[in-house]
Image (cartoon, helix red, strand yellow):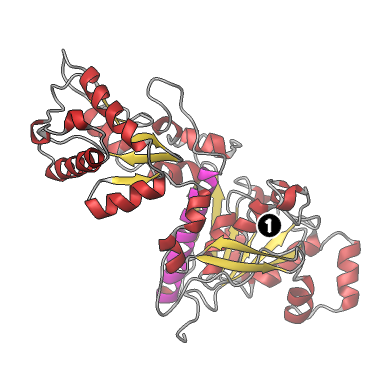
Amino acid sequence: MKDGEGLLEGCRVLDLTDEKGHLCGKVLGDFGADVIKVERPEGDASRSIGPFFNDVADPERSLFWFAGNTSKRSITLNIESREGRDIFKRLVETADIVVESFEPGYMNEIGLDYPNLRMVKPDIIMTSITPFGQEGPYAHYQATDLIGVSMGGLTRLLGELGRPPVRMSCDPQAYFHAGLQGATGSMMAFYYREITGEGQYVDVSMQAAVVLALMHAPEIQELMKVNVIGTGQFFVTVRPEPHGFLFARLIMPCKDGDVCCTFGGGAFRGQVQSSEALIRWANEEGMLLEMRDMDLSKFNASTITQVELDRQYNLVNEFLKTKTKAELYEEAVKRGIMLAPCNNIEDIMKNAQLQVRGFWEKIEHPELGEIIAYPGAPVKMTQTPWKISRRAPLIGEHNQEVYMKELQLTGKEMDTLQSKGAI
C-alpha cells in the first residue's frame, strides 16, 4: 500500500442495504473501499426520504441519500430475477464483502445467502444488518428507527425528568448505530481474512447496537437496580430524606441561545475555582454582588435546599443572559470557567476548530450546479487517510462502467437484460 491510499484500498464491497445500513457502506467507502451500491431498477426506496435539495422532491435530490452514500458507485439490478442473481454472483467473484439489510431468510429464499455465496467465493465476507438479528423471537419483526431506539433503551435516557421518553432529533440514530457496527464488524472480518484467508458471516442487530451506546446505564441497573432516566437540563443528586432529590441546572439560556455551565463547589476544587471566576467576572460588571463573599468551598450539595440552589442559579442565569454564546465561551476559556456553548448546526459549520482541522469536505454535485459541504474525517490517519472520493451516485450511474467495462457485457446483452427487468 502506498502512502495516501485509503485504509481499505483494493477492497470491494457490494452494498445491498436500505436506510438501516447505508452508513456501513459509506464508512467503508470513505476509508477507500470500492463500494458498489446495488439498487433495484427503479432506484433505492430510501431515495424518497427527505428533506430534498431546494425542497424539490426527487429521488436524485434526497439529502438523506446524499449523506449516507458518498464514496459509492451505483448499479441497478433486480436480484429477484434469475438473470439478476447470475450477474450478482459474477460480481461476488470480484468482491470481498457483501452487506445487506433484508429481513432474515430473504437472501436464503433467493439463493444468495452466505452458504450460497461461499460456493461462489469461499472467502467472501457477508454482513447482515437487521432490526433484531438473525435469530430469536423478534428476528422477523419489522422496525423503524423509532422502534430501534426505543427497544434499545435510548429513548428512556432522554427527555425531561417526570415526562415521557423522547427520541434524539429526527435523525435515525438506531440506523446509524447499526451501520457503524456493521462497518466495524466488516472491517474486523476483513482483517481476520487477511491473516487467515477465511471469510465469515457478520450478524448485526440494530437493537444490540443501540444498547451498546447506553454506556453505564446497564451497569447501574445491574449493580444498583436503578433505571437511569432522562433528566433534561438538570444533574440530579439522590439524597436521603428529609432532603430528597436535588436538581442542579446544567443548561441555561444566554443572549442568543443556551450554554452548558456548572456552578457549585464543595470538595470539587476545580468547580470552586470555576464558580469563583464566574462570580468575579460578573462582579466586574456590577452583577452577582450578592455572591461576592460566598465561600464556595463550603458548598454542600448533600444539605443545601432546592430553594437556595435555585436562587443561586437564577442569579447566575441573569448574568449569562447579558452575553452571547461566543462572548461567554471566549471569556470562559480565558478565566478558566467550566462553560461551553450548546452549538446548533450553523455554529458547528462555522466552528473555528473544525475549520482549522479541515473537517468539512466540499463535494461537487455537477447535476445540481452546487458544491455541498459534508462532514469529513472523524479520525485523521497519516498513512491511510479517510476521504470522500465521490458524491452519492445517481440511479444506475455506473451501470456501463461496471457491466460493460468490468463484466464485459455487450450492448446487446445490456439491452436484453433491461428488457427483462433485470437491470
Q: Name the side, left or right, on which 230 lies relative to 285.
A: right
- The boundaries of the magenta stretch are 172-195
Please report the residue visible at 41 percent of the width from the left and 70 percent of the height from the top. 380
User: Which quadrant would residue 213 be assigned to in this image?
Assistant: top left
User: Does 176 appear in magenta?
Assistant: yes
Image side of residue 199 versus residue 65, left or right: left
Quickly name the residue at label 1.
Answer: 111
- Name the secondary structure under disc 1: loop
The x, y position of residue 412, in whole percent, is 91, 75
Residue at the limit of the structure toward the top, as seen here: 242
Which x, y percent locates residue 71? 61, 68
* Residue 120 forms part of the magenta stretch: no
Residue 228 spot, x, y in % from top left: 32, 30
**Amino acid type for the residue under numbered disc 1:** Gly
- Residue nearest the observer in this picture, 134 or 223: 223
Q: From the viewer's perspective, tell me whether residue 396 is left or right of residue 375.
A: right
Residue 342 image-quadrant placement: top left
